Amino acid sequence: MNGTTGTSGTPRVIVVGSGPTGLLLAGDLAAAGIPVTLLEKRPHRTSNLSRAFVLHARALEQLDARGLADDLEAVGRPISRMNLFDGLTLDLGALPSRFNHVLVLPQYEVEKVLERRAAEAGVDFRHDCEVTGLTQDTDGVTVHVRGGEDLRAAYVVGTDGMRSVVREAVGLPFPGRSAIRSVVLADVLLAEKPETLLTAAAVGDAFAFLAPFGDGYYRVICWHRGRDVPDHEPVDLDEVKEITRLALGRDYGMHDARWMSRFHSDERQAPSYRVGRVFLAGDAAHVHTPAGGQGMNTGLQDAANLSWKLAAVLHGHAAPDLLDTYQSERHPVGRTVLRSSGAIVRLAMAKGWQLPVRAALATALNHLAPARRKAVGQVTGIGYHYPAPRGAHRLTGARVPDLALAGGGRLYEALRGGRFVLVTPDPCDPGTERADRLTVAHWASDRRTTLLVRPDGYVAWAAESAQAPDVERALATHLG
């Protein structure tokens, strides 16, 4: 087990797993002044295991709130239209977001910027550190590490993937099923460059997807309904070429594969994302088919939701029951992603009598704007609205777009301090006792709504023409 420079002493939070979800979460906590240790069983990050290749608008907004999105935009490649099946096209150009596109880049590019941020914030990285189990009591959690001393923290978050040791240790089931078996992965060079940045199609029993790494290699993900073999069955380049030809009409002259593997894609979700002082996020909490590219994006949003709540509770600014809202807000989103990604892959692989149904659905989505907006909102993540208390303002729980603020600023720049942002139409003095937790900003327009925006970019409270006592009550409720 080896550690890198980071916070010293007993961690307040232990994060298990250093994928994108764990890196974002640990970095947020450390940036908020919470001592955090990140445990990873691998001796170092292995970039060629990337399965994710896109960042959607909502994940990019969360990264923008951390000052990271522009760096990723510089290395990725945006596409504004997603072509699915039967002429169904999702046009992202009209998205109410600064990021009205899908950004194509491999997962390891996201991990690099998140890892750098976490290290700079003071996260204590411990690689080659395999967690074997944990025990918890009313005061904290003890994490057992193979060949090392037990570690103790107030809270533990498992971001350790589909085969999560943390999830197993707290006794949570992972119900679901294998949706697609014997999916083939390969990293190859191509003699012919595809016409589009992302290339995907399904014909008959075959499906194939191509995405660029950016270094000349392409990731191929392909599947044939009739070839159901175990994950350990060897893969050769001829198999990859054959399936790709069946699905895409040609294999683009694939050659020089540097890596090939086989896996199966499951649809599963833990019934709870929390057991006592232990939380699950990302693939440890939910897994689904890769259709729509929502996996990494959903995990990043899990982390953004949980991190500020843990920091608020550990700093004593919020009651522990705030942590219960992680389950009520994120579990329904995970369930919806499971259903939508599963629907996409089943429609893509439709056959027989299902084909006319698929064509009718594509036509409806192309011509019915409300249905199209809902589909785009789910895939990109911007369409989710968290539950609000009865009688709350209609905006409470809604995602806030990147508002223009007085003085030439914008909301997601104001969120970069990890604070709440109070957006008001008039000058407002909330006092100095919350200065480390609250940024006050003003509309660039003449809008009269007052918004209290959470650190994750959702509305905590809103009012029309609010008076000072109303604002003070809202701040007392949400910031302590």
Image (cartoon, rainbow, N blue to C red):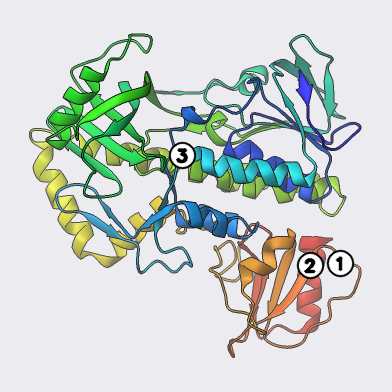
Amino acid residing under circle 1: Arg
Residue 212 in view (yes/no): yes
> Would residue 175 appear left or right of 354 to someone viewing this image?
right
> Who comes first in sequence, dot 2 or dot 3?
3
Q: Quadrant of residue 374?
A: bottom left
228, above or below 433, in the image: above
Q: Which residue is mark 2?
A: 438
Amino acid residing under circle 2: Leu
248, above or below 480, in the image: above
User: How crowded is the residue under tag 3: few (<14 C-alpha within 10 Å), some, or many (20+)?
Assistant: many
Residue at point 55%, 60% (across, down)? 70
The picture places residue 311, in percent across and down from the top left corner, at 78, 48
Residue at point 82%, 37% (across, down)? 6
The picture places residue 47, in percent across and down from the top left corner, at 52, 31
Q: CA distance from mark 2 to mark 1?
A: 6 Å
Amino acid residing under circle 3: Gly
Look at the numbered disc 3 and give the secondary structure of its residue.
helix
On the rendered image, what quadrant is the N terminus found in? Answer: top right
Residue 295 is labelled as 3
The picture places residue 480, in percent across and down from the top left corner, at 84, 60
357, above or below 254, in the image: below
Residue 434 is labelled as 1
Look at the numbered disc 1 and give the secondary structure of its residue.
loop
Residue 472 is labelled as none
